[in-house]
Image (spheres, helix red, strand yellow):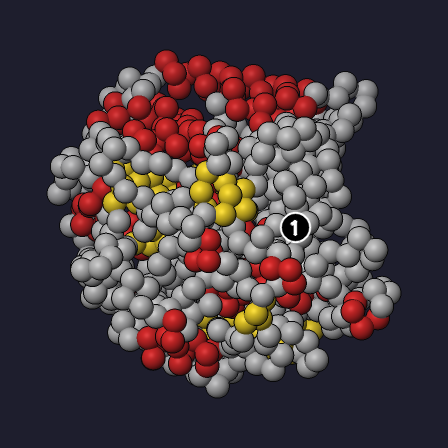
């Protein structure tokens, strides 16, 4: 959705700001309150460990190597990262440079002109250099709060300055972190070379350090572009082939196609060209536009690219001060260097797996075939009142990653879709919806894209099957959930401001919320800006600064897909709340046993739309509140990410099923029982968090097919990172000393 800046009321803004200050003061004053007694019949206190409360904080889109590439652990500990593997080294000034084992991270070009391939034929990029990384994010110096009137305050009231506007727009930061919310703009036009990066146009074909101390350079507070992070793209980036397998990497995934996938298809044909055919290659037109190129052409700056370049290969450098808060937490508490995103691809599917231990599929019981998503059919003929809908158009919601004829890896049907008037207020103009490929029937190897993954899973061993029910079309990429926050059905809503790229309500696949409810264990999902979202179901105020800012992430809430929760107003009220409630629950001693916490788009750390230091600040506020409260002694705070965001990572990836696993992501645990900078190497993913909850409260897995049924990993003799009994997932108890 495009960022929009709509008017807001300045005096209301100031009142909200004062109210937040009052809440902050109250929270500090109440920080030593004791916990309220459990409700009658509650099993909250019936744990197998001293941990009585679990808080899971989920940021956005960073791999382990992207954040911890140069991390040096505490004495006696070992970490697997770019530095320890020798892929990079540090010079005398601690700048990251190619290391003795640089070849392990070497990126390659490839050729896939006829069919989707997991491991296509490869060769070097021209001059063995990466395609130029491109800029992304806000260009203004004050980030998304740039301009003379960042809150859109209507006259005659004076405009709020950037800092005041930021503080009434987002409440999830410590006071000293708001300076980062109003700074870090790129100063560059998006989709052009990111000249802040050292030697941006001649980078060796492998991982590179993002940050530097150059004048007008790329510092840790800077906004960065966002790499592609979709399902088939990520499978392809990992370059998995059994012929490449060895005892320390039995999956045969070499991770050397991140840049190539990024510059050949990026976020999908629907996203790059709105579903239009790929323009002819620039080298065939003499660089006369319109044309398509995989590397930015200074002499043809308007040529079509995927808009990313080799963004995926960038990483931060902790040895020069990047990510200081997360480094401190890793030094002080415990961390995993073998924790993974659970689904290849993006935000929605990974949050769904986090909540369910499983993927969900299309099911519309009103159809003749209830399992078949819209495929080359016209939708949105009429709006909610029966009037002709300006968004009427033909969608193709089934993925087809096979290349279009005459192209190299330009997927036929893939992308976020053209969404018409979605997210905008009336009046509406004719804006047909189209595209939107995001489902696959992964039980059928004849389906586009499915066969190569299906065959790989058979040949790689590891007892990994597709884990796909027959005839079901599973959601692989981001679609809106089946419910709005107000409990109404979002799938059947045809308001032009809504989107047809919405999955029907899920009534088939249970969640950890259902599991906890069934065993009388309290839980909540705290979504930042939920209170602003509920009255704004179409998110008209998305991208609008001010007290009504609606940067709530609807696709991130795994329970918002589910009829068992969203179809019951009492369940919504009890379990889905704003992060303001989290702060007050900590202060008042009313924290549930299990908490899932999601920051808003301002502070979730997502590249381009947010920054990693803002997610550090969001996390710090919660950690500080807990540590200053009664809960400090009996709470485990898990800090992780939804997915790697398409950034490169060098770690082992275990094939569990059709859906993943994907790249490693950070996982830090803050508790009184996880200290000393311990690094745990047991193989895990998002579902490991469910296994921890289930073991701690002695409850069964979510379902008989969910991944939390997998055994704990038994490490191989040659590598602690590789399970011998796969598919296997840790329950994370190794991060604690009880």
- Which quadrant of the view contains residue 157? top right
* Nearer-the-camera pick, 455 or 560: 455
Total numbered labels = 1
Relative placement, left or right, of 647 versus 466 is right
Q: Quadrant of the C terminus?
A: top left
Asked whether, in this view, residue 466 is left or right of residue 8, the answer is: left
Give coordinates of residue 344: x percent, y percent: 45, 62
Closer-to-camera residue (299/537): 299
As drawn, 721 above or below 60: below
Residue at the spot 64% in from the left edge and 21% down from the top edge: 164
When asked about the image quadrant of residue 401, the answer is: bottom right
Residue drawn at 51 percent across, 36 percent down = 95
| Lateral position of residue 405 relative to residue 43, left or right | right
Q: Is residue 521 visible?
A: no
Residue 690 percent location from the top left of the image: 28, 52
Which residue is painted at 81% across and 20% down in the image? 156
Q: Which residue is mark 1?
A: 202
The answer to whether residue 491 is above or below residue 170 is below
Nearer-the-camera pick, 58 or 411: 411
Which residue sits at x=83%, y=57%? 300
Can I make out residue 120 in this image?
Answer: yes
Q: Position of residue 170 (x, y in %)?
A: 56, 30
């Amino acid at each position: 959705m495009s960022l929009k800046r709509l008017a807001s009321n300045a005096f209301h803004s100031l009142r909200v700001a004062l109210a937040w200050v009052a809440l902050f003061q109250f929270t500090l004053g109440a920080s030593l309150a004791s916990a309220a007694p459990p409700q009658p019949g509650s099993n909250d206190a019936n744990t197998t460990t001293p941990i009585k409360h679990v808080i899971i904080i989920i940021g956005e889109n960073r791999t382990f190597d992207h954040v911890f590439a140069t991390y040096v652990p505490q004495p006696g500990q070992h970490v697997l990262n770019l530095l320890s593997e020798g892929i990079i080294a540090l010079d005398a000034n601690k700048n990251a440079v190619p290391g003795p084992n640089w070849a392990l991270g070497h990126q390659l070009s490839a050729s896939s002109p006829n069919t989707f391939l997991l491991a296509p034929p490869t060769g070097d990029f021209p001059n063995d250099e990466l395609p130029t990384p491109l800029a992304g994010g806000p260009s203004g110096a004050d980030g998304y709060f740039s301009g003379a009137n960042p809150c859109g305050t209507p006259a005659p009231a004076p405009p709020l300055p950037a800092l005041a506007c930021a503080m009434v727009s987002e409440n999830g930061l410590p006071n000293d972190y708001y300076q980062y919310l109003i700074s870090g703009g790129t100063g560059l036009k998006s989709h052009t070379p990111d000249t802040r990066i050292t030697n941006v146009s001649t980078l060796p074909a492998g991982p590179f350090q993002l940050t530097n101390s150059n004048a007008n350079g790329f510092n840790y507070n800077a906004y960065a572009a966002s790499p592609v992070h979709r399902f088939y793209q990520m499978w392809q980036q990992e370059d998995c082939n059994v012929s490449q397998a060895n005892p320390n990497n039995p999956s045969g995934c070499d991770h050397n196609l991140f840049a190539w996938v990024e510059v050949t298809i990026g976020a999908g044909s629907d996203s790059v060209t709105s579903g239009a055919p790929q323009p002819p290659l620039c080298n065939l037109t003499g660089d006369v536009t319109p044309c398509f190129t995989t590397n930015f052409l200074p002499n043809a700056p308007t040529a079509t690219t995927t808009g990313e370049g080799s963004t995926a290969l960038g990483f931060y450098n902790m040895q020069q001060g990047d990510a200081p808060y997360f480094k401190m937490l890793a030094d002080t508490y415990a961390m995993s260097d073998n924790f993974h995103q659970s689904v290849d691809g993006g935000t929605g599917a990974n949050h769904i797996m986090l909540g369910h231990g499983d993927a969900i599929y299309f099911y519309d019981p009103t159809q003749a075939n209830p399992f078949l998503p819209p495929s080359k059919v016209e939708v949105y003929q009429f709006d909610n009142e029966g009037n002709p809908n300006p968004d009427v158009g033909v969608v193709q919601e089934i993925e087809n990653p096979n290349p279009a004829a005459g192209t190299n890896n330009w997927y036929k049907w893939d992308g976020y879709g053209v969404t018409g008037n979605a997210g905008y207020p009336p009046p509406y103009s004719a804006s047909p919806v189209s595209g939107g490929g995001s489902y696959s029937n992964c039980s059928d190897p004849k389906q586009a894209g499915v066969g190569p993954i299906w065959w790989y899973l058979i040949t790689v061993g590891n007892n990994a099957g597709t884990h796909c029910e027959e005839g079901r079309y599973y959601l692989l990429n981001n679609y809106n959930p089946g419910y709005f926050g107000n409990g109404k059905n979002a799938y059947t809503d045809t308001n032009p401001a809504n989107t047809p790229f919405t999955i029907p309500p899920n009534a088939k696949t249970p969640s950890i919320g259902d599991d906890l409810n069934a065993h009388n264990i309290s839980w909540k999902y705290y979504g930042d800006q939920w209170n602003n979202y509920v009255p704004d179901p179409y998110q008209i105020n998305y991208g609008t600064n001010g007290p009504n800012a609606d940067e709530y992430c609807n696709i991130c809430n795994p329970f918002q897909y589910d009829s068992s929760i969203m179809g019951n107003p009492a369940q919504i009220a009890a379990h889905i709340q704003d992060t303001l409630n989290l702060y007050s629950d900590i202060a008042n001693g009313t924290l549930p046993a299990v908490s899932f916490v999601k920051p808003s788009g301002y502070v979730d750390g997502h590249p381009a739309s947010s920054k990693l230091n803002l997610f550090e600040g969001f996390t710090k506020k919660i950690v500080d509140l807990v540590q200053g409260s009664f809960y400090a002694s009996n709470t485990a705070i898990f800090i992780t990410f939804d997915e790697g965001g398409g950034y490169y990572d060098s770690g082992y990836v275990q094939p569990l099923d059709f859906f993943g696993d994907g790249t490693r992501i950070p996982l830090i645990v803050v508790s009184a029982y996880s200290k000393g900078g311990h690094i745990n190497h047991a193989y895990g993913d998002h579902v490991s968090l469910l296994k921890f909850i289930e073991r701690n409260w002695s409850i069964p897995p979510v379902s008989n097919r969910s991944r939390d049924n997998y055994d704990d990993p038994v490490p191989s003799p040659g590598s602690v990172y590789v399970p011998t009994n796969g598919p296997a997932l840790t329950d994370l108890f190794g991060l604690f000393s009880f």
